Every structure is written in structure tokens, then in C-alpha cells.
């Protein structure tokens, strides 16, 4: 038993909080550091449960109508998009967003907190000036992160929620419960894309049920029926579909507009953080290669290396982090 514990202690792979013992990260690791999540998991669980509940309600209310009165295929089609919706949600919520490791040489030197003179000396030693680099003749400043004790590469930023520097930081999503960065942005935008598609499809099926039921009830067209006093003769079997359609319309407007916003950012190869900071208002974006290539590089490229799980004796070379 002791031998096994010694082997675990001598293992080169250590959990993220243990590795950052002097400046703990708020991120959580699972399955031997294969999965990474943020500290706020409540939104993820609520969102996952909401998708399951709405799917059950749709298949319980509108599903039988599609299967019996319209076409069984219409009831089978949304199964795959809903599966993709749940899968991309899990990947976005439990993937390494691109966490940049701290300076491992300084991890055992905690910040002094008792002596004011020592604290002042420590802060003065760590107030390093920004470095100046040029990428395709465009100037960039590499800011020094006092928490991680590294110079952040271009497009990286420190997330105050997870307490990590993240490559190509987009934003911290409290709904998903994780940072959105270079390594999981494709999963995030795929998730909101599938959410928009599922809302449109299920909303269309609910609307089709409402229209056909009203036409059958009044034995006339839908537009003629709506001109009558339908409140007195509203078919009871479409009340559930009407309520579900109301919820789906709200999702279509909110999630759909959010998806369109991120699609515009993808075509410009720009992050939400950069757009909010107006980084490229007075200069061109040197990372943009056109709408098509920007989209292909996001969805058709292999994910970059994750630095969360690595050998303590042979730490990763942070020069591998993309600079251009």
C-alpha cells in the first residue's frame, strides 16, 4: 500500500491545484487532469437539465402528433441534433480552454503577507515592464502577469474567476461554467449553433401542430380561423404546444442573436475580449486571414497542445504557445 502511495507521490502528473500550491488556481480537474472545468458548475448542471427536460416535453407533447398525423421521420430527425447539443455542451464545459502554466520555478515561493517591507520588496521585484513585439508589422505589448509570473502571449488574458492565464481568451461563461479560449471555442460556438437549430426545428414543429389543429377544428384555413373568436373554441390539445412554442421563440431570439454575434467574430478572427476592449479599432487585425480561412482554421484544424497535464521534471516549453 505504501509503495503505491509513493508511486502516486512521485508521479510526474499532478493535479492543477497541487501544482499551483503557492498561487492556487480556481479551476478543477477531473479524470487524471483529462477534464478541466471552472469553479462555478451550477450553471452547467442547470443548462444540462433544462435541455433534457425540454426534450422530454417536446417528445411527449408534439412527438406523438408528428408520428401519427404528419410523418414519423419528423419525430426522429431532432434526436441527432439534441445529442450533438449535449455533447458540445459537455466538451465546452470540461475541456481545457488553453490554460497557460505558471512559472514552475517560482511555485514554491509564496507571496509574503506579514512583513510590509518584505511585501513591498516582493511587489517591486515583480512589477516588470511590458515587452514590445511586432506581428506582421503590428505592435503588441506582452503584459506581465503577477499571479502566473509569466509574460502573457498576444491575445491571452488572465481570467479572474478561474485565476488562470488563457490562450486566445474569449470570455468566462458562467452558464457553461468554464473559460472559453483557444482550445474549446469551437465547442462553444458549435453548442450555441446546435441550440439555435434545435430551437428553430422544434418551434417549427410546434407551430405546424398548432396550425393544422386550428384548421381541423374550424374546418377552414388558419388565417380565417384566427379572425374568429378562437378563445372560446381553442383546441385543448395544443395548449402545451403553444406554451412550448413561446419558450422556443424566446430561445430563438436570444440564442440565435448570440450565435450570429459569434459568427461575425469568427469571420473576423476576433475574440469577445478583443471586441470589448476595441483592440483593432485603430489598427488592422494581423491574425485575420479572410472569412473563409478564419472559419476553416477554427473548425478544421487540430486542437493545440494542452499544458494542464505535463511532466514536472520536464515542464512544457511555453514557446510552443502560438505567437502569430
Image: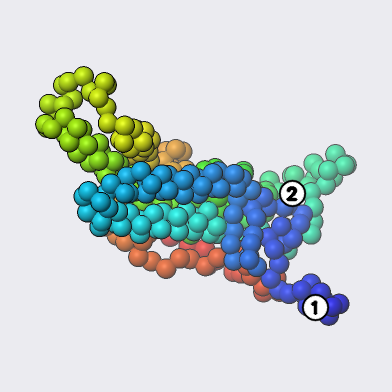
In this orientation, which residue lies closer to the viewer: 126 or 243?
243
Residue 79 percent across, percent down from the top left:
36, 57
Residue occupying the far bottom of the picture? 3
Q: Secondary structure at mark 1?
A: helix
Q: Locate residue 261: give its quadrant.
A: top left
Quarter of the rendering occupied by the N terminus: bottom right
**Residue at screen point 76% across, 57% down:** 21
* Residue at image mark 2: 125
In this orientation, which residue lies closer to the viewer: 40 or 27?
40
* Residue at image mark 1: 4
**Residue at screen point 56% across, 48% down:** 45
Callout in the foreground (2, 1): 1
Q: CA distance from mark 2 to mark 1?
A: 42 Å
Residue 2 percent across, percent down from the top left:
86, 77
Residue 268 visible at all? no
**Residue at screen point 53% across, 53% down:** 93
Q: Is residue 28 left or right of residue 66?
A: right
Amino acid at each position: 500500500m505504501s509503495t503505491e502511495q509513493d508511486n502516486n507521490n512521485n508521479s510526474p502528473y499532478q493535479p492543477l491545484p497541487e501544482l499551483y500550491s503557492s498561487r492556487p488556481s480556481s479551476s478543477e480537474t477531473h479524470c487524471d487532469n483529462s477534464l478541466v472545468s471552472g469553479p462555478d458548475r451550477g450553471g452547467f448542471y442547470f443548462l444540462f437539465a433544462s435541455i433534457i427536460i425540454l426534450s422530454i416535453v417536446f417528445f411527449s407533447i408534439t412527438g406523438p402528433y408528428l408520428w401519427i398525423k404528419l410523418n414519423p421521420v419528423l419525430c426522429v430527425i431532432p434526436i441527432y441534433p439534441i445529442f450533438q447539443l449535449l455533447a458540445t455542451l459537455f466538451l465546452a464545459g470540461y475541456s481545457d480552454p488553453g490554460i497557460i502554466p505558471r512559472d514552475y520555478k517560482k511555485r514554491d515561493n509564496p507571496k509574503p503577507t506579514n512583513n510590509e517591507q518584505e511585501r513591498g520588496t516582493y511587489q517591486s521585484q515583480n512589477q516588470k515592464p511590458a515587452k514590445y513585439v511586432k506581428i506582421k508589422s503590428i505592435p503588441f505589448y506582452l503584459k506581465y502577469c503577477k499571479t502566473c509570473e509569466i509574460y502573457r502571449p498576444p491575445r491571452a488574458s488572465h481570467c479572474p474567476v478561474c485565476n488562470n492565464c488563457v490562450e486566445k481568451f474569449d470570455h468566462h461563461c458562467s452558464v457553461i461554467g468554464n473559460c472559453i479560449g483557444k482550445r474549446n471555442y469551437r465547442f462553444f460556438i458549435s453548442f450555441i449553433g446546435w441550440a439555435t437549430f434545435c430551437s428553430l426545428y422544434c418551434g417549427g414543429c410546434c407551430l405546424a401542430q398548432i396550425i393544422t389543429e386550428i384548421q381541423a377544428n374550424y374546418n377552414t384555413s388558419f388565417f380565417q380561423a384566427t379572425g374568429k373568436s378562437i378563445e372560446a373554441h381553442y383546441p385543448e390539445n395544443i395548449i402545451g404546444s403553444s406554451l412550448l412554442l413561446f419558450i422556443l421563440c424566446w430561445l430563438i431570439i436570444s440564442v440565435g442573436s448570440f450565435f450570429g454575434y459569434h459568427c461575425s467574430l469568427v469571420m473576423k478572427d476576433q475574440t469577445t475580449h478583443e471586441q470589448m476592449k476595441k483592440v483593432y479599432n485603430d489598427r488592422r487585425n494581423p491574425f485575420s486571414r479572410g472569412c473563409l480561412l478564419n472559419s476553416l482554421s477554427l473548425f478544421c484544424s487540430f486542437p493545440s497542445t494542452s499544458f494542464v497535464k505535463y511532466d514536472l521534471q520536464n515542464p512544457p516549453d511555453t514557446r510552443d504557445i502560438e505567437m502569430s
